[in-house]
């Protein structure tokens, strides 16, 4: 399995707090724990040519992990369309935290993907609501984070195919924090936690969820269905072709 971890890599350049938490960038931190599981992992960032997502890179990516926040609008529509086609053709996509507002996620969802939010250093408790799912393997009943950014309902997304985690926040809000979709031949998982000024991606259970999600999202080896005008498989008696 070949994984590409994409990150706009802007907070790390501008905010020393983020740089101290993730000296190799958020993408570097995620790539490191994926590699520790024996998963072949590369990274790509916004300011590289083609945002690091060249045709060659995409052709050699089974699962794409996406983190973005400050610069969603700087991702070119051409790259978004290429990534979308890769997902439809079978590539897995893991969208993290503020990636809910990324062009690629909004394109695949077809909605605003808007939500409530607040930065108040509050506790988050992510409850496992699908305990038999591969993504929750090795996870306890809930994951507790001492400090995180709040995301609250209503989350303007299509009805998920599966609900994996539901979050409760200290301020009282709840949120659908782990959801899956099928798009074409591809699988999509959105996972909420991961605000840049908190060490969320150093949490072992958060790491385990992402590792599990990458394994869950890897492509199924099959061709896409054939669409359009179709010749009959059997003779149509009295019909006209």
Image (spheres, helix red, strand yellow):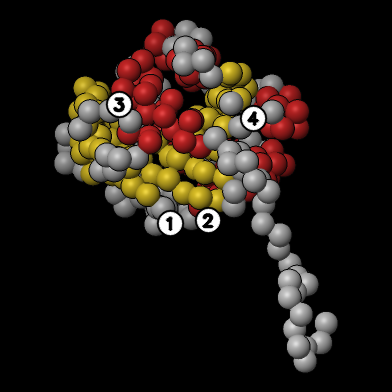
Please state if 178 lies on the left or on the right of 15 as rendered: left
Query: Gap between marks 4 and 3, in whole Å?
Result: 26 Å
- For this orientation, the residue located farthest to the right is 241
Return the residue at label 3.
138
Please state if 6 lies on the left or on the right of 149 as rendered: right
Name which residue lies at 28% across and 35% down. 150
Query: Gap between marks 2 and 4, in whole Å?
Result: 24 Å
SS category of the residue bearing label 4: loop
Name which residue lies at 17% across and 37% down. 171
Do the residues bearing badges 4 and 1 touch, measured as CB atoms within 8 Å?
Answer: no
Name which residue lies at 32% across and 18% down. 203
Relative to 235, does residue 148 appear above or below in the rendering?
Answer: above
Sequence order check, earlier mark of 4 and 3: 4
Return the residue at label 1.
158
Which of discs 3 and 1 lies nearer the camera? The answer is 3
Which of discs 3 and 2 lies nearer the camera? The answer is 3
Name which residue lies at 36% across and 15% down. 202
The quarter in which the C terminus is drawn is: bottom right
Q: Position of residue 164 (x, y in %)?
A: 33, 42
Relative to 102, does residue 149 appear above or below in the rendering?
Answer: above
Sequence order check, earlier mark of 2 and 4: 4
Which of discs 4 and 1 lies nearer the camera? The answer is 4
Sequence order check, earlier mark of 2 and 1: 2
Query: Gap between marks 3 and 2, in whole Å?
Result: 33 Å
Return the residue at label 4.
61
- The picture quadrant where one finds residue 191 is top left
SS category of the residue bearing label 1: loop
Do the residues bearing badges 2 and 1 touch, measured as CB atoms within 8 Å?
Answer: yes
Sequence order check, earlier mark of 3 and 2: 2
Relative to 173, does residue 203 appear above or below in the rendering?
Answer: above
SS category of the residue bearing label 2: loop
């Amino acid at each position: 399995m070949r994984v590409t971890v994409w990150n706009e890599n802007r907070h790390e350049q501008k905010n020393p707090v983020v740089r101290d938490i993730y000296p190799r960038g958020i993408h570097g931190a995620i790539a490191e724990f994926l590699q520790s599981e024996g998963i072949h992992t590369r990274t790509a960032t916004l300011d590289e040519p083609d945002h690091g997502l060249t045709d060659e890179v995409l052709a050699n990516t089974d699962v794409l992990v996406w983190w973005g926040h400050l610069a969603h609008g700087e991702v070119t529509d051409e790259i978004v369309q290429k990534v979308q086609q890769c997902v439809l053709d079978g590539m897995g996509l893991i969208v993290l935290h503020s990636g809910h507002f990324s062009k690629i996620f909004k394109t695949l969802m077809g909605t605003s993907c808007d939500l409530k939010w607040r930065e108040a250093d509050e506790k988050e408790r992510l409850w496992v609501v699908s305990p038999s799912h591969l993504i929750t393997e090795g996870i306890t009943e809930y994951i507790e984070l001492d400090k995180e950014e709040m995301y609250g309902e209503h989350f303007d997304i299509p009805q998920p195919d599966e609900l994996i985690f539901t979050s409760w926040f200290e301020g009282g809000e709840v949120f659908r924090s782990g959801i899956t979709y099928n798009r074409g031949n591809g699988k999509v998982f959105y996972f909420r936690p991961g605000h840049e000024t908190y060490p969320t991606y150093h949490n072992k259970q958060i790491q385990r969820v992402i590792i599990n999600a990458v394994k869950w999202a890897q492509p199924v080896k099959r061709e896409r269905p054939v669409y359009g005008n179709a010749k009959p498989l059997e003779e149509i008696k009295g019909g006209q072709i």
